[in-house]
Amino acid sequence: MNKALALLLLMGVFISCTKEPSQLSVASPSGTNSIDFGLSEDGTPYYLVHHGNETVIDSSSMGFDFQHQKPLKTGLSIVSSTENLVNETWEMPWGEQKEVVNHYNELVVTLEESEAPNRQFNIYFRVYDDGVGFRYEFLPQEGVDSIIIMDENTEFQLTEDYTTWWIPGDWDIYEHLYNTTKVSEIDALSKRNNTDLAASYIPENAVNTPVTMRGENGLHLSFHEANLTDYSGMTLKVDTEFWLLTSELVGSDRSGYKVKRELPFKTPWRSIQIADKASELIESKLIVNLNEPNKLGDISWFEPKKYVGIWWEMHVGKSTWDYAGSQDMNTFTQDLKPTGKHGATTENTKRYIDFAAKNNIKGVLVEGWNTGWEHWIGVEDREGVFDFVTPYPDYDLDELNRYAKEKGVEIIMHHETSAAPRTYEQQLDTAFQLMKKYDMSSVKTGYVGKIIPKGEYHHGQWMVNHYRKVLETAAGYKVAINAHEPIKPTGIRRTYPNAIAREGLRGQEFNAWSADGGNPPEHLPIVAFTRMLAGPIDFTPGVFDIEIPNKEDNRVSTTLAQQLALYVVIYSPVQMACDLPENYENQPAFQFIRDVGVDWDETHVLNGEVGDYVTIARKERKTGNWFVGGITDENAREVSINFDFLDDGVEYEAAIYKDAEGAHYENNPTAISIEEINISKGSALTVQLAEGGGFAISLIKKK
């Protein structure tokens, strides 16, 4: 029986004793997208998603398995339904654009079991012109105060064998290279045993979200989740034969279940972005719109900024995080001798502060400043290894903060937890009090390694709650969090705008030491349409010493022009100029990093295809200046830009940084051409991108 015939038969048979119609529908404000909801003959809830006249998600069932309760998936009837229309505009305190339109139609369906104990729950459907979201609400039950979820069985029945850009459903890390295959060819289990990853657990053939797909007719879908709160992260289990995705929650070997919650509660939203062309995926604000409004109020104490720091020099082997060494790095002996290679010294930090102050850069990140770095690599029990207030002897915290303030620069704190969150939680207040003493407003956190206690994973409910506790505690001290080795971003930055950025992908550092030689040229043209759909990325662009001379097996697989373009293409309100200060000296191209903004009034995606290329234009808040960035994969290409997005009646001085003739990411990566012209609305420009190349344009208003 084919799918279409099966669907017609299914839709023709419903429970006859419901109080409501057995099929309900809701469409987006313009009618572009719609959802049908119904119950099958045995009372199983299902839904379908349509885009125009096309069914993009075929009949897909919904249900849950519990501990100590029977499953909630059949024998249900519709008790009631309500519809709501919402059309509001809210303001991002920082972000890709200042104003966000939140316009959707909502359908809320109440379901009840036909037999005892007659449990009830709600399903919320929100339908936007750029996608759909739905979530479950578990209602009070007599004599039951909490439930334990063993499995959530939300299905997404695809209608074709989409081309898919995916990483495996790893419970511990998102730092995998993206794969490009058909759904029928997804093989997540083959990605196990990656020696470059500090922690990795891939239990089955599943993918992590966001996962983006393209159909034969050019339709794009991206599956993710929004408002991940007190719940396990969702991977998507893949049935390659039937093109079926099913929610698979990250579990816990310690507890033996997926989620435990007190009643009543709502799950995260399951989201599907729907776009006729790839560029519309990046412009969509579905994920943030599915989150609750700002709970923190005024956060003017955090200012988006560019920063430099003591970080890349460790990855390229110039210095170390640890202050001292011993014959056995895993012992706790106090008889440690300074290595002479420690990066976070008072003298070296002042050098970075001076460089930042000289170049319109407002932040300096310092890693390796605090004690403990000698005792955590390869150690099973890392509880208590780090504290977050005690500097090494060669790092003068008082003097450096005095010096930074004098220069108009802020030191960005670094807290590496070594994946020992209980130790970190015990010190949160003390650590943030120290930050407030020195007027530090942001911290980069890290969770390298396997989570302690054993049996918990980075993306399970226990850790989701830890990341939220850190965020909420930090908000009380007016501290912003940039998390590395994080839980995935799910738009919570709308509710807690001190969640400024996070890693959650294979970052720049892999170029310096990974066994496979680094990130391939297609990596970032994929990231822009996958991971970046979830939220801001701390990718740390700006490598000028592309070939990394002291690392003969490693290099950066981009041109210099592409490194500049990343400041516009890969969004974050905190952008690092990651290379060593000496590598920027006497480099005309560094002017773009001095000039480029980090906080935007408007964003326009001018063109792009997943994994191939993308061009983005952004208008800076306060100044009204525009910046454009474009990147390509391993293929050279020509990109045409129409400047119709510029403001009327304004002339701009444009500096164009592009690949010079003969540039190539492999054998001539630093060949760059810089051209200055005047540009106004209606102007047009054609740019040649080299293999692995890019271009960056600053458009400064003429006075």
Image (spheres, helix red, strand yellow):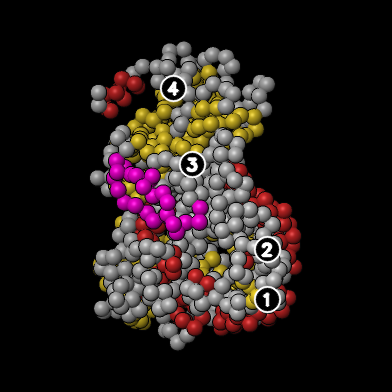
The boundaries of the magenta stretch are 176-199
Q: Residues within 10 Å of mark 3 (few under 14, many from 20)?
A: many
Cα distance, mark 1 to mark 2? 21 Å
Check residue 557 for magenta coloring: no
What is the distance, in whole Å, between disc 3 and disc 1 at their CAs? Answer: 42 Å
Q: Is residue 52 left or right of residue 237?
A: left
Identify the image quadrant of residue 386: bottom right
Question: Label 3, on which residue?
Answer: 234
Of label 3 and label 4, which has the lower sequence position? 4
From what the image shows, is residue 564 above or below residue 265? below
> Which is nearer the N-term, disc 2 or disc 3?
3
Judge whether residue 28 can be spotted in this image: no
Mark 4 residue type:
Thr
**To which residue does mark 2 refer?**
332
Alpha carbon distance from label 2 to label 4: 58 Å
**On screen, residue 596 above or below 279:** below
Looking at the image, which residue sits at the far front? 327
Location of residue 47 in the rendering, given as x and y in whole percent from the top left corner: 40, 30
Circle 4: element type: loop
- The amino acid type of the residue labelled 1 equals Tyr
**Pointer 4 with pointer 1, Cβ within 8 A:** no
User: Which amino acid does the dot numbered 2 rest on?
Assistant: Phe
Of tags 3 and 1, the one toward the viewer is 1
- Per the image, label 2 sits on a secondary structure element best described as loop
Q: Nearer the viewer, residue 697 or 151?
A: 151
Determine the CA span between mark 3 and mark 4.
Answer: 22 Å
**Residue 194 in sight in this render:** yes
- Looking at the image, which residue is at 48% across and 28% down? 63
Q: Which residue is mark 4?
A: 44
